[in-house]
Image (cartoon, rainbow, N blue to C red):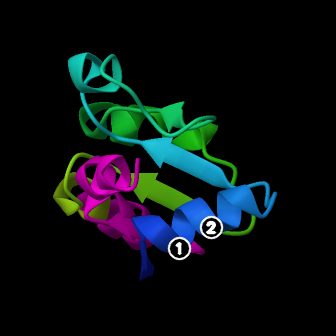
């Protein structure tokens, strides 16, 4: 598991890379905006929905500030997922880029 800054993630998106991004925030948080193309799976639902995550390549996880997405990465790592990338600073950092 590793971390990436919101700025580096944005750069990769702008360069046309096809990235798999998961937003683990609550519904009301996602309603305020998310990274385009992100898949919404609340952290609390991850244990029951993790089979929806195709373990291929890098898998990016974002939340509001980076803690819940880190927990998601840690849980998935303990369940043998690889290629996990936590977005440091989460949506707070992402919104600061706008």
Task: Say which residue label 2 marks.
Answer: 11
Q: CA distance from mark 2 to mark 1?
A: 5 Å
Judge whether residue 79 can be spotted in this image. no
- Extreme-front residue of the structure: 98
Disc 2 vs disc 1: Cβ atoms closer than 8 Å?
yes
- Extreme-bottom residue of the structure: 2
What span is in magenta? 71-98
Q: Seen in the image, is 16 located left or right of residue 57? A: right
Q: State which quadrant residue 81 falls in.
A: bottom right
Question: Which residue is at the front of the view, 64 or 45?
Answer: 64
Q: Residue at x 23, y 50 (%)?
A: 92
Task: Say which residue label 1 marks.
Answer: 8
Give x and y (percent) for residue 4.
45, 76
Q: Seen in the image, is 51 located left or right of residue 23? A: right
Q: Residue at x 59, y 35 (%)?
A: 36
Rate crowding at label 2 as few (under 14), some (14 to 19) or many (20 or more) other CA atoms within 10 Å: few
Give x and y (percent) for residue 77.
42, 71
Q: Quadrant of the N terminus?
A: bottom left
Q: Residue at x 56, y 60 (%)?
A: 10
């Amino acid at each position: 598991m590793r971390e990436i800054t919101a700025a580096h993630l944005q750069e990769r998106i702008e360069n046309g890379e096809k990235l798999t991004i998961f937003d683990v925030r609550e519904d009301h948080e996602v309603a305020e905006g998310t990274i385009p193309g992100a898949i919404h799976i609340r952290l609390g639902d991850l244990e029951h929905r993790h089979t929806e995550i195709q373990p291929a390549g890098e898998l990016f996880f974002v939340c509001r500030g980076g803690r819940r997405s880190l927990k998601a990465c840690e849980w998935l790592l303990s369940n043998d997922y690889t290629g996990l990338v936590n977005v440091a600073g989460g949506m707070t950092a992402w919104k600061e880029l706008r």
